[in-house]
Image (cartoon, coloured by chain):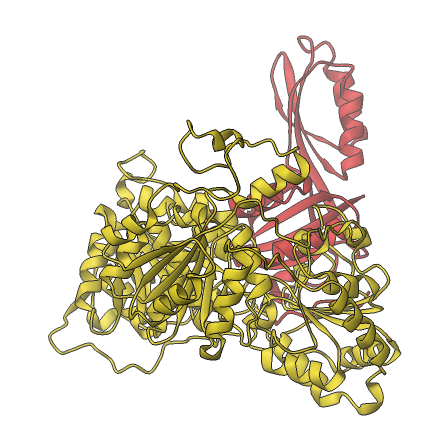
Chain colours: A red, B yellow
Amino acid sequence: MRHVLSALVMNQPGVLAHVSGMLASRNFNIDSLAVGETEDETLSRMTFVVRGDDRVLDQVRKQLEKIVTVVRVIDYLGKDYVERDLMLIKVATEGGRRLSEVKELNDVFRGKIVDVSPEHVIIEIAGQESKVNAFIDVMRQFEILELVRTGRIALTRRGSITQDAASPDPQPAEAR
Amino acid sequence: MATVQTAKSTPTPAAPQVRSYNGAEILVESLVRQGTQFIYAYPGGCSMPLHQALISAQEKLRTILPRHEQGGAFAAQGIARATGEVGVCMATSGPGATNLVTSIADAKLDSVPLVAITGQVPQAVIGSDAFQETPMVEVCRAITKHHYMITDVRDVARIVKEAYHIAATGRPGPVLIDFPKDVQLATLDAAEVDFDPPMNLPGYRPINNGPQPEQVRQVLAALKRSKKPILYVGGGCINSNAAEELTKFALKTGIPVTMTAMGLGSFPGEHPQSLHMLGMHGTVYANYAVNEADLLLALGVRFDDRVTGKLEEFAKHGKIVHVDLDPSEIHKNKAAHVPIVADLKKTLQALNAMIEDDDIPDVTAWQKQIAEWKAKFPLKYNESGDDILQQYAIEELWKRTKERNPYVAVGVGQHQMWAAQFFKFQKPRHWLSSSGLGTMGFGLPAAMGVATAFPNDLVFDIDGDGSFQMNIQELATIRCEKLPVKILLLNNQHLGMVVQWEDRFMEGRRAHTYLGPIDDPEWHGKGAGPIKTDTYPDFVTIARGYDIPAARVRSKKEFPKALETMINTPGAYLLEVICPYQEHVLPMIPSGKTVRDIIVE
């Protein structure tokens, strides 16, 4: 089972190494990890896609919370949220002969051509993971020269964990 | 729980002539203001400014020079484990710092409040593979509760304050402060130094709440319905200073108590309700009782594999109440029916306050059953003959000193388990054992730390010849710093616990478990008998070389008198006891097995 988790962390050197090291040393399986600054420059936000059952996920969350520089962790399970992957993909157009085919498919997926050269284009595409995967599949008929993905990012539709982080923790939910 | 040590009300030492402080001086002054009385520190190039500051502060803070950084770090743990306060050690960069690593990892697994300070090369050369440069923060990330590198002299006081706070609160643990030499030497006007700055720890919220009344009612309801309840108590009980509340609860309800290696001393060992230690080398009756129990009250424990054996089979007939202040321990190894994330002392206080006579089940039949097991399967050893068995030596030491409530530190191996079995502790914090990491060489330096904090108490290191040699150099420290550690050295010339496993699981094939010369037939397990006449090395001569009085005994006839001499000789003393190596620690539940597989003979 796959889960999306977010951690708000102190924006300091070494925090990413600490978090990724903990996940590796405790044998947790991470499909993706995305990091960036937030609206508050003292905080960064990490978003993880974790594979495992409920017990594993519970441990990942609690072990993350134990790291002193991790300010708040949220599990998106059961929450109303928006998630996106971003990809840049470089596709060969055979000297421009297949450019129109590429463009056509790009339009269907509502991607954005961000660079064009005589031999290839770079397309930016954002969306749910399944959409990004589907786009890769349709591009295989052309030659994919290279691609890069950010990993998952996510936000709940309501509320803000940055603001919640200022308030005290709720009592850990230990009544299952 | 150790009290939160905020800046103490020590009078401001800023004498008028102090115009500025350097980073090293701010750090040392901050240690003093945290109430630190002792630091074990070994100097080197990158920590010399710190030592200059320490020597200036010697009236307020005693600096003790160990003979190896690891010894210093375990001595700091000895202070921490015996007092409950933060223990502090210091080393220079590179090899000095890496020599602290084992003790830091040890403190993490046993939840010991430790602050380790390391010198670091100047920031200008960090990352250049400079002389004696090791990236300590990188090395220690996974084995500390938290870690710092100080990059600005204005952060020194805050970081020390935070380090103490993190080490001591919630679930205690080790904190590393890596301190580059250029920042040690950077200066700040006295007027700019704030020794009590605000902390910046938005992500650190240690649990110190008690249970919710509903949770207490759930526990009492489960108790009321139970017929065979048992208390399974660990190091969390000692860390939260809850031994008194636990004892009160146990006596009021009549529930038998079993303890983990970390929990020994939580409940009086000699009380009939005590089932002593459980687990791999626990008593038969403790393991039977846990197996049969219909209610397991797991207090400040983590269901370690040395306790549970095969997890699915552990306490499988019972409901589990699990109280711990580390949320990640709840459901980690074993799912709890009633999980409570709370301070244990407050939880026991709440239970004691809310329990009514009506909640207490009739446990007479259960107590009778346990008494039968106790009578049928006592801890025992062969008492005939004149050889000194390790169990006898330990039991005799206990009998002769128990009125004085001594402190006992141990190494790791058979002697450690026998000490856990045969030394019955009446009080918490008197038993020091590297239980989680299982570090050989822990005993002597840990005892040294206890003797530093309690020089007027009786402090023993019960050690094996393998463990003892791993930090034997600390004999110099105990002699030179006048630390009255009495060493009971149980010398069987072997790595006894590994020998035991060789005997049980590897057809007795000896593989590097003999500690004497390679041309001795014993090296191949083909020696003349269980006791060597010519042992190696000559520990008595070694002790005398360090100017520590010592004696060697081989027979039971001479043992009691030798023991009295050790106890009555002022200061440090080494008593070497030549023991057979073919004794096994029993009972034993083999790794990953269940109580049904228990070996008693």
- Nearest the viewer among A42 and B342 is B342
**Residue at image point 82% right, 78% down:** B223
Instruction: Please provide percent x and percent y for residue B273.
Output: 70, 77
**At which x and y percent is residue B339?**
75, 68
Q: State the image quarter where residue B366 is shown.
A: bottom right
Q: Nearer the viewer, residue B340 or B345?
A: B345
Q: Is residue B444 left or right of residue B213?
A: left
Outermost residue to the left: B17
**Residue that appears at 34% across and 49% down:** B539
Q: Is residue B322 left or right of residue B113?
A: right
Q: Is residue B380 visible?
A: yes
* A34 w.r.t. B210: above or below: above
| Residue found farthest to the right | B225
Asked whether residue B159 appears in the rendered view, the answer is no
The residue sitting at 64% across, 69% down in the picture is A169
Q: Nearer the viewer, residue B141 or B541?
A: B541
Q: Quadrant of residue B426?
A: bottom right
- Residue at the image point whose x is 46% and y is 65% from the top: B408
Image-quadrant location for residue B361: bottom right
Question: Residue B155 at what x, y percent from top left?
Answer: 34, 61
B266 horizontally vs B589: left or right: left
Point out residue B457 in the picture as x, y percentages from the top left corner: 38, 75
